[in-house]
Amino acid sequence: MKLEVIKNITEYLNLISDNKKQGKIWFRGQKYSEYQLEPSLFREKLDISIDEPYYKREKYLIKNSNLSHEKFKENVKKYKDCSAFDEIDYLYLMQHYGIPTRLLDFTVNELIALYFSVSNFTQSSLEIEDEIYDFNSTNSFTKHGSAVYCINPILVNEHSFRKSEIINLNEYNFESLNNIDFPICIKSNSVDDRIKVQEGVFVYYGTMIHPLDYYSIFEQSMTKIFIPNSVRDVIKKELKNNYNISHLTMFPDISGVSMEIIDEMDDEFRILKKNTVANKELS
């Protein structure tokens, strides 16, 4: 996997422009660079291949996603009009309410991915050069920054589904996708407002439980872009002021309003705390 570092939006956009020359690109912003590309369903698993040699272990116990999917569909209709829903809408809504699924969300918009990478404030505990050093010395899995992953969805599907195209979930029997082995890149004619605003697309994981960046055949075409903690807040404010990308625009409901208010309260408190400490030291 190609590893890159950016310190501002200009560097980021120049890097993305170079990546786009290689073909179609999807983006995922992650708040922590130490996390891999795996869906919530796979983050808690138990290896049950006890008698197998380490290199043969592929049997894992995970939560029953089929049961949760059907139970959710059955009950959500009591509270919400689902007449225009397709399967990905149910899955996305499940994710929204904290139910583990096989979906991992990406976006076709590089600035939206950058927003998700820097959207929460993280206090920097190191100088920026030390944060970058830690990124390089840990093979990118560091807690001192966030990341944007860039993947080639066509290449993923060529290997996983033997098709050089993005799979439209509306054109396939959803049940049949449960039998696939490796992750595939999918899209949908979704009616969900958040998916539309966030220009969302998805990787749907099959029976193999490894992160997408575990597979060398996919990793060869990936780029991971590191954003040091020291510059995340500045980039977040620039996205809001110069590109109109913020909590309010990415979450067009009460969630976005709440997140924006929390940020304003936190920013004000940090300034007051800093000034109070400074005044106390002077006195």
Image (spheres, helix red, strand yellow):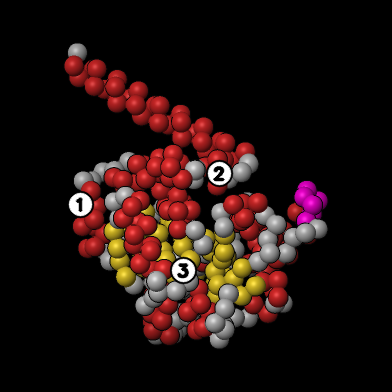
Outermost residue to the top: 283
Instruction: Tell me what residue is drawn at x 70 percent, y 77 percent.
Output: 172
Disc 1 or 3, which lies upstream in sequence?
3
Q: Amino acid at mark 2?
A: Thr
Q: Quadrant of the N terminus?
A: bottom left
| Residue 100 place in picture, x, y as percent | 58, 60
Instruction: Tell me what residue is drawn at x 34 percent, y 59 percent.
Output: 14
Measure the alpha-carbon separation of dots 1 and 3.
Answer: 30 Å
What SS does tag 2 mark?
helix
Disc 2 or 1, which lies upstream in sequence?
1
The numbered disc on residue 249 is 2
Work out whether 70 lies above or below 246: below
State yes or no: residue 221 in magenta: no
Q: Is residue 281 found left or right of 40 in the rendered image?
A: left
Work out whether 196 lies above or below 237: below
| Residue on which the image places disc 3 | 25
Q: Amino acid at mark 3?
A: Ile
**Foreground pick, 232 / 122:** 232
The numbered disc on residue 14 is none
